[in-house]
Image (tube, rainbow, N blue to C red):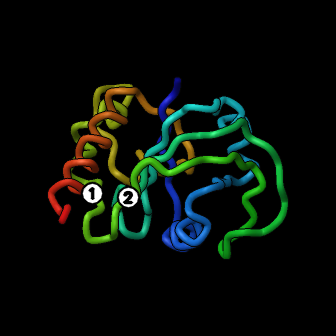
Amino acid sequence: MSYWLSSISYERFQVDEEYEFAVDGYKDAEFNRALRVEPGDLFVYYIKQLALFGVLAEARGRCYLDWGRLWPDGSYPVRFERRPLLVLPRAQMVPASPLVPRLSLAQGRGGESLSLGQLLRFDLREIPQADYQLIEREMRRMGDSHAD
């Protein structure tokens, strides 16, 4: 099983909500990364304009190509089916900036810390299990703290 971080626009997030997070898509430049996605892989979604982590999902299949346009901000032909595991309301989404220094992937090759922009510049990237689990814990804590 692999763990992934997906950086999406707020416009894409809104469309994903309409489709109940059933499908995910990426530009063809992400094709080689997306080929590594397997059913059961876990994803955390970062919403760029909000700088928030808001969704956890699981891949339900391997990637395929579909040039039909679903999202308003462009064509994302590299797709796979997914199912949401946790979707937080906007008020409960987790701010990324306090978590980034705690993520192992935020450490550059020379030991320097990467900025939020550097870290999340790719739409799709594989991340260590521990980083996924840290974000997941924070997201579940935020969801639980606002239950009822």
Tell me, for residue 144, which label it has, or none: none
Location of residue 116 in the rendering, given as x and y in whole percent from the top left corner: 34, 51
Q: State yes or no: discs 1 and 2 in contact (Cβ < 8 Å).
A: yes
Q: Amino acid at mark 1?
A: Val
Give the left or right position of residue 26, taking residue 94 as reference: right
Q: Residue furthest left?
A: 145
Q: Quadrant of the C terminus?
A: bottom left
Residue that label 1 marks: 94
Residue that label 2 marks: 54
Location of residue 31 in the rendering, given as x and y in whole percent from the top left corner: 73, 41
Q: Earlier in the sequence, mark 1 or mark 2?
A: 2
Crowd tier of the residue under label 2, counting other residues whose Cα lies within 10 Å: few below 14, some 14–19, many 20 or above: many
Give the left or right position of residue 24, taking residue 49 as reference: right
Measured Cα–Cα span from mark 1 to mark 2: 7 Å
Q: Residue at x 71, y 54 (%)?
A: 27
Nearest the eye: 88 or 122: 88
Nearest the eye: 73 or 13: 13
Crowd tier of the residue under label 1, counting other residues whose Cα lies within 10 Å: few below 14, some 14–19, many 20 or above: many
Q: Secondary structure at mark 1?
A: strand
Q: Amino acid at mark 2?
A: Gly
Give the left or right position of residue 28, taking residue 4 as reference: right
